Amino acid sequence: MSRKISLQDLNRVLASLDAPRNGQALYALLATFCMAGLMLASAESALAKADNLTGWLWAAGAVVSAFLGLNTTGLLLMDQARGRPVRDVADAFSAALRTAPRVLLCLFILLMAVALGVGVLLTLLWAARLPWVGVALFALLVPVGVVFLGVVAFSGVVLVGPLTGPSIWAGNSVQETVRMLWRQLRHGPLEAAGLMAAALAVSGLVSALVSLVVMSGGRAWALLVVWLTGIDVPAQQLMAGLFGYGLRSLGAAGAPLAATPLGMAALVGGGTVFAVALVLPTLVYLRGCCAVFLVLQDAAQAEERAAGGAESRLV
């Protein structure tokens, strides 16, 4: 799987910029964020009233809805990345109910493998306290521990986090996904890191552009609505709504607020802008993860075909 990154590979990753054109995925992710946000607000309200059970139930529901929504969106983006007709949102949600447990199982297996390695390291560290071999063992464990934990962090950021979902969304089993991640870590970690860096750069660029639009448009709108027309809504409250803040968080921060119908409308409208601004970079990032996985999968299949052809010629 180790090979040079070609311009065609980078072009496939850069094509993630067309993710916002996937209307089904845009709708699914926007609905996911809105649903999860409402559940989190309900959880915050319940916890503020000392109703811990209801609050934690709402919080758990927000996590579940966000996870299922991300898997639904990922399936829709995988269809787009593979050049296939994008399925309906209802069909994608039904498929997400089947694939989401496989994603969790894959993550659980990898987490258990990491926990086993950490357990071995802790056992050896305990053995380093022995008087006869302690010093030499500890000297050996320092580089081993640093490399192991560094590889775990690298794998989580570059391989496990970005590629586990796309592998399952593409139809691979849990076993195939774990083998793919291990093979990529052994033979092509730098190639995967380079492709993921390109995907992160694209999503970061989109995030910066969206932030520029929201900040400049929000300040201009605050000038027009609050100062020029004299509407009784604090400009700070209007801007806070654009970044997802509510009345409770504004009050806790000591910011000026107006608990009037217009003030509430400003927060609701700002929250809508915040949701859309959060959706666009997330769409591009998920689409980029799908593209990186497909590039690595195609490379692995090409090398397997080349190896099979070489063996047949030898025979």
Image: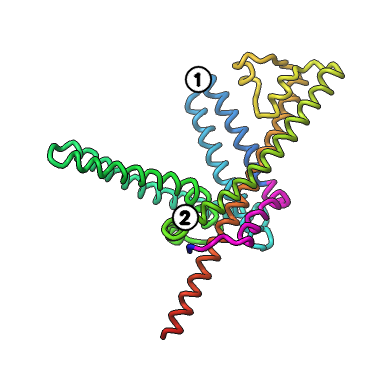
Q: Residue furthest left?
A: 132
Image position of 46 with respect to 306: above or below: above
Task: Name which quarter of the figure residue 176 lies in.
Answer: bottom left
| Residue that appears at 62% across and 52% down | 287
Residues rendered magenta in the picture: 3-27
- N-terminal of the two: label 1 or label 2? 1
Seen in the image, is 75 located left or right of residue 142? Answer: right
Decide: few, some or many residues near mark 1? Use Cα within 10 Å; few <14, some 14-19, many ≥20: few
**Residue sitting at x 49%, y 46%:** 157
Task: Tell me the element at label 1.
Answer: loop
Identify the residue at horizontal 75%, vertical 25% (top origin). 266
Query: x and y percent of residue 64 in the render?
Result: 53, 41
For image coordinates 63% across by 39% down, the residue present is: 33
* Of labels 1 and 2, the one closer to you: 2
Residue 17 on the magenta span: yes
Asked whether 15 or 263 is in front, the reply is 15
Along the horizontal axis of the image, is 305 left or right of 87?
Answer: left
Is residue 7 or residue 306 the one in the foreground?
7
Q: Which secondary structure type mostly characterizes the magenta part of the structure? A: helix
| Residue 39 seen in the current view | yes
**Residue that numbered label 2 is attached to:** 189
Rendered position, 63 above or below 307: above
The amino acid type of the residue labelled 2 equals Pro
Which residue is label 1 attached to?
Answer: 50
- Residue projecting furthest to the bottom: 315
